[in-house]
Image (spheres, coloured by chain):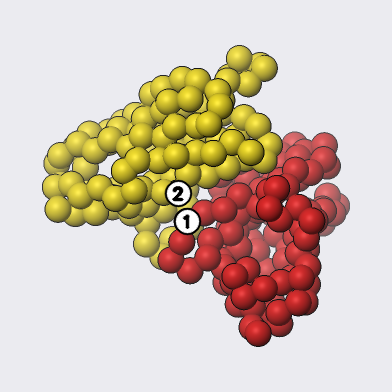
Amino acid sequence: QVQLKESGPVLVQASETLSLTCTVSGFSLTNYGVIWVRQPPGKGLEWMGIIWRNGNTDYNSALKSRLSINRDTSKSQVFLKMNSLQTDDTAIYYCTRALAYWGQGVMVTVSS
Amino acid sequence: DIVMTQTPLSLSVAIGQSASISCKSSQSLKYSDGKTYLNWVFQSPGQSPKRLIYQVSKLDSGVPDRFSGTGSETDFTLKISRVEAEDLGVYYCCQGSYSPHTFGAGTKLELK
């Protein structure tokens, strides 16, 4: 069955770079894209970016100068990297396939 | 970027009543392939989100037919007939027609 699982550090220092991994199973990254979505505590969902099945990427306009999404299809992994973190980047970070299948999310706290 | 405006932001309903949520986009969501990529996503407290409806009106597998989606171009509606306790939470519309994709602010469905 389709599964996605996020992994990465739960605490990051301000100004540093966040690196998260989404490991998928039950489907191939060459057949489906993967989206990253985040949710600050008590707030709504924010679409961050997508890596399409052909490897192309699109990003949230407000984040694109700091964000990159890549993948390793042989390992079924999608990677998110975001630099220059600030405290308002504290959020639950989710990866999802087409919004239909979601990981459990990883809570990332940015400490000043 | 396309702005998704949801109303109301909060809705109180009694069990068994119906509920309706509006979502308006700042431009038409009809894509060049003729399809309209408007999704409805639901998040119950403490849980990962899940998609209920895609392409305006298509129900995801397992979604009760109490849920229905209508609309076109820039105006969309999610209707829940006969609200049940498990329906309480936050509903988001999300457009996937044009990158970057964007979420509405969310509508919190509460018990009256």
The residue that label 2 is drawn on is: B105
The single residue placed furthest to the bottom in the displayed view is A112
Amino acid type of the residue that numbered disc 1 sits on in the rendered structure: Gly
Give the residue displayed 83% in from the left and 42% down from the top. A55
x 40%, y 40%: residue: B6
- Residue furthest top as drawn: B34
Left or right: A80 in relation to B96: right
* Nearer to the camera, B74 or B68: B74
Characterize the local packing of mark 1: few (<14), some (14-19) or many (20 or more) Cα atoms within 10 angstroms.
some
Estimate the x, y position of residue B108 in percent, counting from the top left.
Answer: 32, 52
| Colour displayed for chain B in the image of the structure | yellow
Q: Which chain is red?
A: A
Q: CB of mark 2 within 8 Å of CB of mark 1?
A: yes
**Residue under the point 44% across and 32% down:** B24
Q: Which residue is mark 1?
A: A44
Q: CA distance from mark 2 to mark 1?
A: 6 Å
Tell me, yes or no, if residue B86 can be seen here: no
Image location of residue B109, percent across then percent down: 28, 50
Residue A17 higher or lower than A53, as above or below: below
**Element type where label 2 sits in the image:** loop
Mark sitting on residue B77: none
**Does residue B80 sit above or below B112 in this rendering?**
above
Disc 2 sits on a residue from what chain? B
Chain letter of the residue beneath label 1 in the structure image:
A
Horizontally, residue B5 falls left or right of residue B11, namely right
Task: Name the side, left or right, on which A25 lies relative to B96.
Answer: right
Q: Position of residue A30 (x, y in %)?
A: 79, 40
